[in-house]
Amino acid sequence: MAARNVVIGIDLGTTNSCVAIMENGKPRVIENSEGDRTTPSIVAYTQDGERLVGQTAKRQMVTNHEFTFNAVKRLIGRKFDDPNLHDSHIAYKVVRADNGDAWVQGRNDEKIAPPQISALVLAKMKKTAEDYLGHEVTEAVITVPAYFNDSQRQATKDAGKIAGLDVKRIINEPTAAALAYGMDKKSGDSIIAVYDLGGGTFDISIIEIANIDGEQQFEVLATNGDTHLGGEDFDDRIIQYLVDEFKKDTGADLRKDPLALQRLKEAAEKAKIELSSREQTDINLPYITADASGPKHLNLRLTRAKFESLVDDLIKRTLEPCRTALKDAGKTTKDINAVILVGGQTRMPKVQAAVEEFFGKPPRKDVNPDEAVAIGAAIQGAVLSGEVKDILLLDVTPLSLGLETMGGVMTKLIEKNTTVPTKKSQVFSTAENNQTAVTIRIFQGEREQASANKFLGQFDLTNIPPSPRGMPQIEVTFDIDANGILHVSAKDKATGKEQSMQVKASSGLSDAEVEKMVRDAKEHEQEDKEFHETVMARNNADNLIHATETSLKELGDKVEPKERADIESAMSDLKEVIKKGDKRVIETKTQALSDAAAKMSQRMYGAGGAGDAPHGHEGDGSGDSSGQGKGKQEEVVDAEFEEVKDKKQ
Amino acid sequence: MVEKREKEAVEALASPNDINELHREIESLGKSLLEAQDKAEENWQRLLRKEAELQNIQRRMQQEIDNTRKFAIERFASEILEVVDSLEQGINFKDAPEGMKLTYSLLLSVLAKEHITPIEPKLGEVFNPSFHEAMAMQPTAEFEPNKIVTVIQKGYMLNDRLLRPARVIVAKAP
């Protein structure tokens, strides 16, 4: 049975690329074989004729400047004579192709087209998706900057084709981001500003989402930006600061030491990230360098305020393009309905504050800014493959459903927020010896004490063959169907006898009641915990008493009179306190009985005797399944079940 | 609902004048049947797809869990490398206390236990970007081009994944 064709979403970035898919309606970024969620957009042709892609290509860049092709996005679809083409970041040779396009020079003097290079990156993203999905991927949505012209878009599509991908659509990066933020879910028209501050570039786009013929259409009104402004520049400011401070203190220039510089770079990036959530951070680099007088350490405190002052001009530099973009779009900040953030550097609080100040409203930042574009592409892919139509929005049960067990405890069978339809079974048993019927009392809510929850109904299962408590196996099943109706059934596994009842969806609670109950549960959490523990203690004590009584009876004369007297006295003590209910006292008396009966139980084990040996405390979790609610000792007439109607309905 | 129709059909048979009505009834039922069959087929296909998707997702989840287990300490491991680096630098000084050297050994053995192992290329070894990162090139006659001249910083593996590449200087022709 073939899986549906998955259309993957690829953010083909200048420095890094990212691939995402929709998995049953939820977007998911896929890690590559190295465990990274993004892959450097770098391709290298080595001396041995190997082609490296991603991190491995990046790592050998220094040894192979001429034939390591990075930032190919700056070339793709452009002519050799394009005035925008002068880039100091490019160390390889750009050559003129026969058709006038900008190509690059390969190892054997051959000319390589940029789509061929990008195709290798896309192929790696394709493989990443295939490894995860476990099947072939042939279709994709790829994103491009909003300012890309037809030639650049076509070249990107060609790159996809070379990589073996049928590019279903090329979409704009700001549009993809808007999709990731669910901007298409709103009704009516809106104007969105997309502020994208990534690793190496800054882009601002003003897009309009309009409802045309029932469909949401995206139009880019204006774009602007700075192709050489990004997170790396922010890192550089910190590095410079550290180098300067260290020189002031020690006279040493850390830039001359490649290891020191490397450590500084990593420390700077780490500090930058920490300052997004802390007011200050310590940069601690012991043994950063050494001179004639011995080892030197770098230990500096960097405050958020200081960092902000170091990069203030960089942040301000992003605002002018915003002004221009608004002007070109013919809009003012008042016309902007929402601002969304893309790119890792937008995590910085000062950046967010600057954006808020400029646009006059707080930006949306709830989607991972490094992944928003890939996620948007994946969403678009899912729409194109028809997967989105197939996703049913299912309900969830707002509150837990369960029944009342021994001690008045609410034993949940279906946890709250479980998607329905759903079915859950659990085996219960009797609480007393020779109990021939059980009452199933159904409750809805989060409180530990069943009676504190909403009672939904009850019914009896009768004619259970008499047996010692805990022996019968009563399987209780809670089944909520697609219409929200709860069916509860109880079946005696020995006899096959079954009884059940239905609870209609409407006999539950209103939204307001649900919220109140969830709040109540939180407020009473401590109280409920103690209640639960007390019941556990009581049940444990009860079990121990029962088992001890059974053993005493079975061993008969084998138990010495003094021992028997001790045990019986401990047992009656315990029976006393069970009624009164202090958890700690119960536990103490339980332990006392356990100790008194210890010798006897050893003998039980030694003799290989039948029946339960008395056991002490059970773990919190395990005690739940045993024990069942109110029992009837004598013959019972088949009971009718009654449904309790909610007075409020 | 079905009972009612059957009743009608039986009654219709009883009076042969209503044979046209009977035909119409059959036609209408036929249409409903076809619609119901189409719908059933559509639902069946949808069910199959969902089943397949469910199985796929289960498989992927299991893979995720396995990976998580294997690489759970990845972040922590990356962070602790800084400490290892610092200690390493420290023990090279002549006044480094004996205890510090022992602590460093202890740290390395703890790391090894957690499957974090160092990458220490030898000088003259071929540069391999799968495990090494070239920081600079150095013209030299001592080593052939593309061989490692200096190891600036050790690298580390976590299980079979690269935690940090060894940072090296690579030879180039003089």
Image: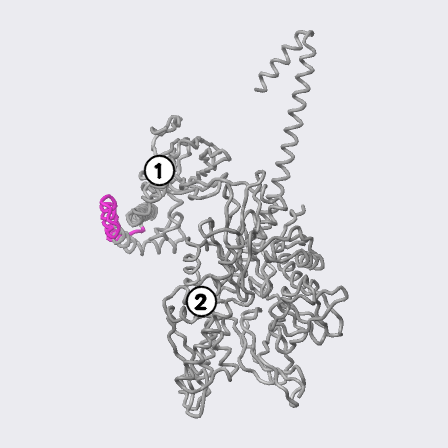
Residue kind at label 2, given as amino acid type: Ile
Q: Nearer the viewer, residue A644 or A419?
A: A419
Confirm whether residue A635 shows in the render. no
Q: Secondary structure at mark 1?
A: helix
Q: Residue A97, relative to residue A635: is it above or below?
A: below
Q: Residue furthest right?
A: A98
Name the residue at 42% across, 44% down: A415
| Chain letter of disc 2 in the image | A
Q: How many marks?
A: 2
Q: Residue A342, relative to residue A40: is it above or below?
A: above
Q: Nearer the viewer, residue A203 or B11?
A: A203
Label 2 and label 1: CA atoms lie apart by: 43 Å
Which numbered disc covers residue B90?
none
- Range of magenta residues: A558-585
| Chain letter of disc 1 in the image | A
Q: Nearer the viewer, residue A443 or A319?
A: A319
Confirm whether residue A330 shows in the render. yes
Quick check: is A359 in the magenta stretch? no
Q: Is residue A453 left or right of residue A57?
A: left
User: Which quadrant is home to the C terminus of chain A?
Assistant: top left
Q: Nearer the viewer, mark 2 or mark 1?
A: 2
**Residue receiving disc 2:** A273
User: Which quadrant is home to the N terminus of chain A?
Assistant: top right
Quick check: is A569 in the magenta stretch? yes
**Residue receiving disc 1:** A513
Q: Residues within 10 Å of mark 1 (few under 14, many from 20)?
A: few
